[in-house]
Image (cartoon, helix red, strand yellow):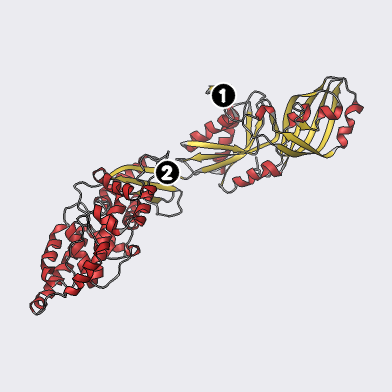
């Protein structure tokens, strides 16, 4: 049974005769059967040729009975519409339609022999050689050699932008044929090349890789195609629609696929056909598969860390390209996670941050790490415990607890706590004038003290100048000697504690110095708790 209908005969003749591959012919005939496209291209070509051959045989006797020549009115009408149907020389040549029986035999015979062995003039070979088992095996060899863990895959393909130009040219030719038959053909009626390619490739990849194709999979296999021979075919669009082609910092060429599609939507048909043949000519060479890439979706690991050193920044401390300290909390944790997950890179985030000379005690500070393109993604709870222990054994400066895999969405709960939750601190304070216990006892009775804090001088180089209102929920003092006492504070997240103690030259009001009516400074600061109930605590 033929895959196309009798109404498609003129289209099949036109495209096969112009050097279009059988799968692209089916696309332009609006054939939507996935299974049909998976048939070998030689079989599809034979079916289409047989379809044309049968049509010629059936028409043979009828042609002898035609007494009158084809109606000229149709030709005249099309000539009057010619402003929208010009080719690169000025007019689309009249191709044989259903009514032009005198030329049907010649066109049909040409179509029976023209397509075989040629690079498709529309898909540039993508629906030919790149659907074959040899190419599928090449892709799978690349995937297997990359050593990823995955349980499914999603396949993506990047096509040369000039394919859109060629598809437009073929569509204009086919549209003319369908108009001769009195049948409309919208661009949306053409089955998309990418869609057909995936119909063919997906089952082959799934069988070779041993896992199913899944549009929601986090593991992506992608192929990037290029066709240097026809790269310049898009350039005329820049003259016709210059607004569509604007340089971008991250793009090597202005002729991106989206820019070309946008220009094709704007350009008038008559302008297009002055610059491009319709249907397009056949190229000499196939596309090149420039890149075969694999990428796993990010994995997210969360936990809480304690920092016991007063000489360790949270993130690498680098000023003007010079490293100030040899390590950081981020690096001590990421070193082990990167090695175990075999990731390309990472992004570290936490619920707030402490200064380099501030310790984080208690139950620690919540943190999360995004591991980009990890090769390994499956870890049992026991394996995560061993990984946590390895981090803790590697340094006495930090300790990690509650290490676990989390989702991207769950990380939002940690970020919410930065401004909404409370934090508890312990500060060792010095005063210039001698103090007695009764001099600081009143601090214990202060509740919900409202501060106005201008951006501290020490962070003004990286934070915008602003006045922030913050709350000191409660305080309790612990007398040490005439010049020292320890102050325990429960504050709103985001409060600058050091500035609350010494006043930052009056930029924080009120402050401990102003409350005690003497100069005060902070000698040590510890974070005792970060009251964010995330990530969930795990049993030891």
Quarter of the rendering occupied by the N terminus:
bottom left
Q: Is residue 399 above or below residue 34?
A: above
Residue pictured at 88% horizontal, 37% vertical: 445
Q: Is residue 222 above or below residue 195?
A: above
Quarter of the rendering occupied by the C terminus:
top right
Q: Which disc, if any, is residue 295?
A: 2
Residue picked out by circle 1: 319
Using a 10 Å C-alpha cutoff, classify the residue at mark 1 as few (fewer than 14 neighbours), some (14 to 19) or many (20 or more).
Answer: few
Residue 257 screen position, x and y as percent:
36, 49
Query: Marks 2 and 1, Cα distance to the nearest angstrom?
Result: 33 Å
Residue pictured at 61% horizontal, 46% vertical: 412
- Is label 1 in a helix, a strand or a loop? strand
Q: Depth check: 100 or 445 in front? A: 100
Of the residues under marks 2 and 1, which one precedes in the sequence? 2
Residue 46 screen position, x and y as percent:
17, 62
**Residue 3 visible (yes or no):** no
Drawn side of residue 241 relative to residue 330, left or right: left
User: Which of the 4 image quadrants contains residue 266?
Assistant: bottom left
Q: Depth check: 161 or 448 in front? A: 161
Residue pictured at 32% horizontal, 47% vertical: 239
């Amino acid at each position: 049974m033929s895959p196309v209908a009798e109404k498609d005969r003129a289209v099949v003749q036109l495209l096969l005769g112009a050097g279009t591959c059988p799968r692209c012919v089916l696309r332009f005939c609006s054939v939507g059967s996935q299974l049909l496209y998976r048939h070998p291209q030689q079989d599809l070509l034979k079916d289409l040729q047989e379809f044309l051959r049968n049509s010629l045989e059936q028409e043979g006797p009828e042609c002898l009975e035609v007494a009158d020549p084809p109606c000229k009115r149709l030709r005249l009408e099309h000539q009057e519409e010619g402003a929208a149907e010009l080719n690169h020389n000025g007019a689309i040549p009249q191709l044989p339609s259903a009514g032009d029986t005198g030329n049907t035999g010649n066109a049909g015979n040409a179509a029976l022999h023209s397509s075989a062995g040629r690079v498709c003039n529309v898909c540039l070979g993508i629906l030919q050689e790149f659907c074959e088992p040899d190419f599928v095996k090449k892709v799978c060899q690349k995937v297997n050699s990359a050593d990823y863990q995955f349980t499914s895959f999603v396949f993506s393909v990047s096509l040369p932008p000039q394919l859109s130009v060629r598809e437009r040219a073929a569509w204009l030719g086919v549209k003319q044929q369908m108009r001769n038959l009195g049948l409309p053909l919208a661009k949306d009626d053409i089955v998309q090349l990418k869609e057909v390619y995936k119909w063919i490739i997906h089952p082959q990849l799934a069988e070779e890789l041993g896992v199913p194709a899944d549009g929601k999979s986090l593991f992506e296999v992608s192929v990037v195609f290029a066709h240097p021979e026809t790269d310049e075919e898009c350039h005329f669009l820049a003259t016709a629609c210059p607004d569509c082609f604007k340089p971008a910092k991250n793009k090597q060429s202005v002729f991106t696929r989206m820019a070309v599609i946008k220009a094709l939507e704007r350009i008038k048909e008559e302008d297009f056909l002055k610059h491009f043949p319709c249907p397009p000519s056949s190229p000499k060479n196939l596309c090149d598969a420039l890149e075969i890439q694999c990428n796993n979706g990010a994995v997210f690991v969360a936990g809480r860390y304690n920092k016991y050193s007063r000489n360790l920044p949270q993130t690498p401390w680098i000023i003007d390209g010079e490293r100030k300290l040899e390590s950081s909390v981020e690096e001590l944790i990421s070193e082990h996670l990167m090695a175990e997950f075999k990731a390309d890179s990472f992004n570290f985030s936490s619920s707030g941050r402490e200064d380099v000379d501030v310790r984080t005690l208690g139950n620690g500070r919540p943190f999360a790490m995004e591991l980009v393109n990890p090769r390994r993604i499956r870890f049992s709870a026991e394996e995560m415990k061993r990984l946590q222990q390895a981090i803790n054994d590697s340094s006495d400066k930090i300790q990690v607890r509650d290490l676990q895999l989390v989702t991207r969405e769950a990380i939002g709960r940690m970020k919410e706590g930065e401004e909404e939750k409370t934090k508890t601190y312990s500060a060792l304070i010095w005063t210039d004038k001698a103090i007695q216990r009764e001099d600081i006892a009143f601090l214990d009775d202060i509740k919900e003290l409202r501060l106005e804090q201008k951006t501290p001088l020490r962070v003004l180089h990286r934070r915008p100048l602003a006045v922030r209102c913050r709350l000191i929920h409660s305080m309790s003092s612990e007398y040490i000697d005439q010049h020292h006492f320890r102050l325990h504070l429960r504050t709103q997240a985001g409060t600058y504690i050091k500035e609350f103690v010494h006043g930052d030259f009056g930029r924080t009001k009120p402050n401990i110095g102003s409350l005690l009516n003497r100069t005060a400074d902070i000698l040590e600061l510890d974070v005792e708790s970060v009251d964010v109930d995330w990530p969930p605590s795990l049993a030891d």
